[in-house]
């Protein structure tokens, strides 16, 4: 059974991605939250080209993907959950929650450690914020994320089904909470007690250090509340806040594929200022 699930993992994830992408794109066109500063065609061409490149690289380096790693770990008896004999439904729920925490922690590390921030800033340098921002990551970050995911799966030993559910949720929520949309205010206030909403995560893409070093969650919102990194609103408001990175404002550098791929390697002499020092300032810690 797990072999069949693993064999169809790419189709399941691909189908879910297309469905959520179409739905979010339609929502953004019908009821956008913010006016775009760069033509959608320019940004989407580059952001989606980066997605295609990352998908090719990930499948080339990790052909079995995370589901294959879970299947292998089960066969080897690796991981805590392979020895607990939990009810299947409970194992899936606990595994999805645990993997979500791993991704949250990884996201914090990408901001707190200067060399990792160099890679991650490709995601943050987008001058606008829409569903394609949720797919805009440097290939080096994709490889690093996959290695961290493999290590977590080996230690945790989650069911294959749980890993596929998590991957589908991660892709879907990344597009949802990066959407250029807003939920009705009263409804949104309650949703964000459980899930990361577009208004909540948009704060994380502010040019202000204390705002960008908050709201790290992609799916569950509880981690930011538990660890003190939650911020309800940006100072400038959802429509007035400035998005991106203050030092990178030229569209040719951050909205075109060659500039995006080169961004981690620029300004070598100023690496700490963009990573560690920004983190320290936003956390109110002496440098």
Image (tube, rainbow, N blue to C red):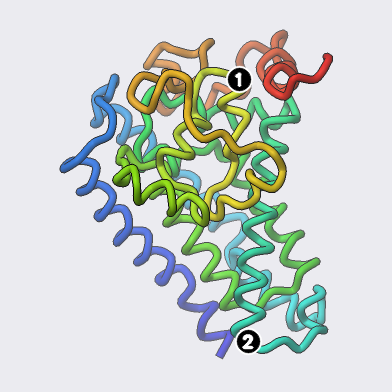
Q: What element carries label 2?
A: helix
In the current view of this chain or complex, which residue is farthest to the left?
Answer: 30
Question: Which residue shows up at 53% across the image and 70% down it?
Answer: 164
Which sits in the foreground, 191 or 241? Answer: 191
Which sits in the foreground, 48 or 93? Answer: 93
Vertical arrangement, residue 63 with respect to residue 260, above or below: below
Label placed on residue 88: 2
Tell me the quarter of the image containing the N terminus.
Answer: bottom right
Label placed on residue 201: none
Residue annotated with mark 1: 209
Q: What element carries label 1?
A: helix
Q: Let me know if residue 145 appears in the view.
A: no
Coordinates of residue 190 in the picture (x, y in percent)? 44, 52
Question: Which residue shows up at 56% across the image and 78% down it?
Answer: 161
Question: Which residue shows up at 68% across the image and 35% down it?
Answer: 110
Which sits in the foreground, 57 or 206? Answer: 206
Coordinates of residue 224 in the picture (x, y in percent)? 63, 44
- Left or right: 98 in relation to 205: right
Q: What is the tally of numbered marks visible in this picture?
A: 2
Q: In which quarter of the image is residue 142?
A: top right
Q: Distance between the residues labelled 1 and 2?
A: 42 Å
């Amino acid at each position: 059974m797990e072999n069949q699930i693993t064999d169809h993992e790419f189709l399941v994830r691909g189908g879910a991605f297309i469905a959520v992408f179409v739905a979010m794109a339609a929502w953004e066109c019908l009821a956008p939250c913010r006016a775009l500063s760069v033509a959608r065609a320019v940004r989407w061409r580059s952001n989606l080209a980066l997605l295609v490149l990352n998908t090719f690289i990930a499948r080339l380096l990790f052909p079995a993907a995370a589901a294959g790693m879970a299947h292998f770990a089960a066969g080897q008896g690796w991981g805590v959950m392979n020895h607990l004999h939990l009810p299947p439904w409970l194992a899936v729920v606990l595994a999805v929650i645990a993997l979500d925490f791993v991704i949250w922690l990884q996201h914090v590390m990408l901001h707190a450690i200067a060399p990792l921030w160099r890679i991650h800033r490709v995601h943050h340098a987008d001058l606008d914020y829409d569903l394609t921002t949720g797919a805009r990551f440097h290939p080096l970050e994709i490889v690093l994320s996959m290695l961290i995911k493999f290590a977590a799966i080996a230690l945790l030993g989650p069911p294959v089904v749980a890993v596929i559910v998590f991957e589908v949720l991660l892709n879907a929520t990344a597009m949802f909470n990066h959407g250029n949309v807003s939920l009705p205010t009263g409804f949104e206030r309650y949703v964000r007690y459980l899930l990361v909403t577009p208004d909540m995560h948009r704060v994380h893409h502010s040019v202000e250090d204390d705002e960008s070093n908050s709201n790290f969650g992609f799916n569950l919102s509880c981690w930011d509340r538990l660890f003190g990194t939650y911020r309800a609103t940006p100072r400038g408001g959802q429509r007035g806040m400035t998005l991106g990175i203050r030092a990178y404002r030229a569209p040719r550098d951050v909205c075109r594929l060659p500039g995006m791929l080169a961004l981690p390697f620029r300004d070598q002499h100023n690496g700490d200022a963009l990573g560690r020092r920004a983190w320290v300032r936003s956390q109110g810690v002496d440098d």
